[in-house]
Image (cartoon, rainbow, N blue to C red):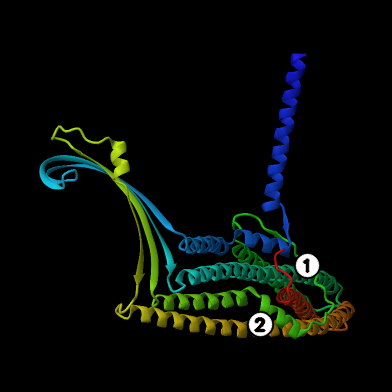
């Protein structure tokens, strides 16, 4: 029976270890290796691993600590003090209040507290300034996340474009190689000339060069995407290049998107909070020129002993009770002249407020332009795509017709190469317009309230 239990425990341990191994492998697959990254995956990965975002989080932690410190400045401050020491030589004897030349031991205890009653509302406005700083920090954090996602989106579409361009170039190269093979057969049969064969060889060489160029551009775009994602350069990144754009043009209200963006865009929110923060700082600076009223209170007692007179001193408990002293007091401070420091602080705070207001105005103008440009480009790329699609269809028909006539010897290899180049360019234009339209659609949706990273 005991052996059966041991076998069962060993089997259970093996199952647990196997499950842990599977979980670790699944986590590794999720994080990178063997996974195909879509656009949303790339943006999410970049937001999680971006160093600027992580630094901004630490900065926001500092803002929250400053806010707590500003709140704590309104609370009473308290301190405890205990001192003990001995002295030798001429000193005052507390029991007789006369000088004596001997050794003494003293032990003192004190507790004190202070509380601001009025400080020109500096503490209240300081709390408000710290709160606006926290809100601004959160808005800036979201802005950095969105900017990171947009940069990754642009790099992602570059990878998709050059990947599909390489596929188009490879497909065109295959067609040219087939035509070269046929032209050689025609030359052997005396139907085609050596010049036609040489022209087709030149077209195949040009196709091979174009394919190599597109593959190099694809690799460079992938390198750039890894950089924007903060993805390890030595690891393999597999990107989903089968991105299908929704090519149905949706009508959008420019003013509705502008209205939403002007109220909710993180850049606008950060600029607005920065203005309010500077406004509170100005009030704090003005409060420095107002009178300050503080309440102080405390308690103290001590123990004293002459080390050389041989007299019996009162016990510690008795002295501790009889030497007690309490006090409370008000302190009123009125600033009269401080070397123009108060006025300097107020003027600088006022200038900082004006600068932040100018920054908010500039941010609003830039966002207005960005939103309008994104909508105009989206509509323009939709029209370009439809035109490029028609052009590609016409170029394909022309190429197929020229290829058929070339096989019959009715057109020259130069005419065939021209038709091939036109088809290749039309395909690249259609692909570029399609991806640019998809990118602008995502950008317009973001300005309209759809998060880039969910």
Q: Secondary structure at mark 2?
A: helix
Residue at 67% across, 75% down? 264
Q: Secondary structure at mark 1?
A: loop
C-alpha span from label 2 to label 1: 25 Å
Give me the disc on residue 243. Answer: 1
Instruction: Judge whether 1 appears above or below 139 on screen.
Output: above
Q: Residues within 10 Å of mark 2 (few under 14, many from 20)?
A: some
Residue at 70% across, 38% down? 20
Q: Pinpoint residue 437: horizontal percent, then vertical percent.
A: 76, 78
- Left or right of 182 in this view: 49: left
Instruction: Judge whether 247 appears above or below 141 on screen.
Output: below
Whether residue 311 appears in this view of the structure is: yes
Residue at 61% across, 75% down? 269
Q: Pinpoint residue 146: horizontal percent, then vertical percent.
A: 64, 69
Give me the disc on residue 370. Answer: 2
Front in this rendered view, residue 13 or 264? 264
- Mark 2 or 1, which is nearer the eye? 2
């Amino acid at each position: 029976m005991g052996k059966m239990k041991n076998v069962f425990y060993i089997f259970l341990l093996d199952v647990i270890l196997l499950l842990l191994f599977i979980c670790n492998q699944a986590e590794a697959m999720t994080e990178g290796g063997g996974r195909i990254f879509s656009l949303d995956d790339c943006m999410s990965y970049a937001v999680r691993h971006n160093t600027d975002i992580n630094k901004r989080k630490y900065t926001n932690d500092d803002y929250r600590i400053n806010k707590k410190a500003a709140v704590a400045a309104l609370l009473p401050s308290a301190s405890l003090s205990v001192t003990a020491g001995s002295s030798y030589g001429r000193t005052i004897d507390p029991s007789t209040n006369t000088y004596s030349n001997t050794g003494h031991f003293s032990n003192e205890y004190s507790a004190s507290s202070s509380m601001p009653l009025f400080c020109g509302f500096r503490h209240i406005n300081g709390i408000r300034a710290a709160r606006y700083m926290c809100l601004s920090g959160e808005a800036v954090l979201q802005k950095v996340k969105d900017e990171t996602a947009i940069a990754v989106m642009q790099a992602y579409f570059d990878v998709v474009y050059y990947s599909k361009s390489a596929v188009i170039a490879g497909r065109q190269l295959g067609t040219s190689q087939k035509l070269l093979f046929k032209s050689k057969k025609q030359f052997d049969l005396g139907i085609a000339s050596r010049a036609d064969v040489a022209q087709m060889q030149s077209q195949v060489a040009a196709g091979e060069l174009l394919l190599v160029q597109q593959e190099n551009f694809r690799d460079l775009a992938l390198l750039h995407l890894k950089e924007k994602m903060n993805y390890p350069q030595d690891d393999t990144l597999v990107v989903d290049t089968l991105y299908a754009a929704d090519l149905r043009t949706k009508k959008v209200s420019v003013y509705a998107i502008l209205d939403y963006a002007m109220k909710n865009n993180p850049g606008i929110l950060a600029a607005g909070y920065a203005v309010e923060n500077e406004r509170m700082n100005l009030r704090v600076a003005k409060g420095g020129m107002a009178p300050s009223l503080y309440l102080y209170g405390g308690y103290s007692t001590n123990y004293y002993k002459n080390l050389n007179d041989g007299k019996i001193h009162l016990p510690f408990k008795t002295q501790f009770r009889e030497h007690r002293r309490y006090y409370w007091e008000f302190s009123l401070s009125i600033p009269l002249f401080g070397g123009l420091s108060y006025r300097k602080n107020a003027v600088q705070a006022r200038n900082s407020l004006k600068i932040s207001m100018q920054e908010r105005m500039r941010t609003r103008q830039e966002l207005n332009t960005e939103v309008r440009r994104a909508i105009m480009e989206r509509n323009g790329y939709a029209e370009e795509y439809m035109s490029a699609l028609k052009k590609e269809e016409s170029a394909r028909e022309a190429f197929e017709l020229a290829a058929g006539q070339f096989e019959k010897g009715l057109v020259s290899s130069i005419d065939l190469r021209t038709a091939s180049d036109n088809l290749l360019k039309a395909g690249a234009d259609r692909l570029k317009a399609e991806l640019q339209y998809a990118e602008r659609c995502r950008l317009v949706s973001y300005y309209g309230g759809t998060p880039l990273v969910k």
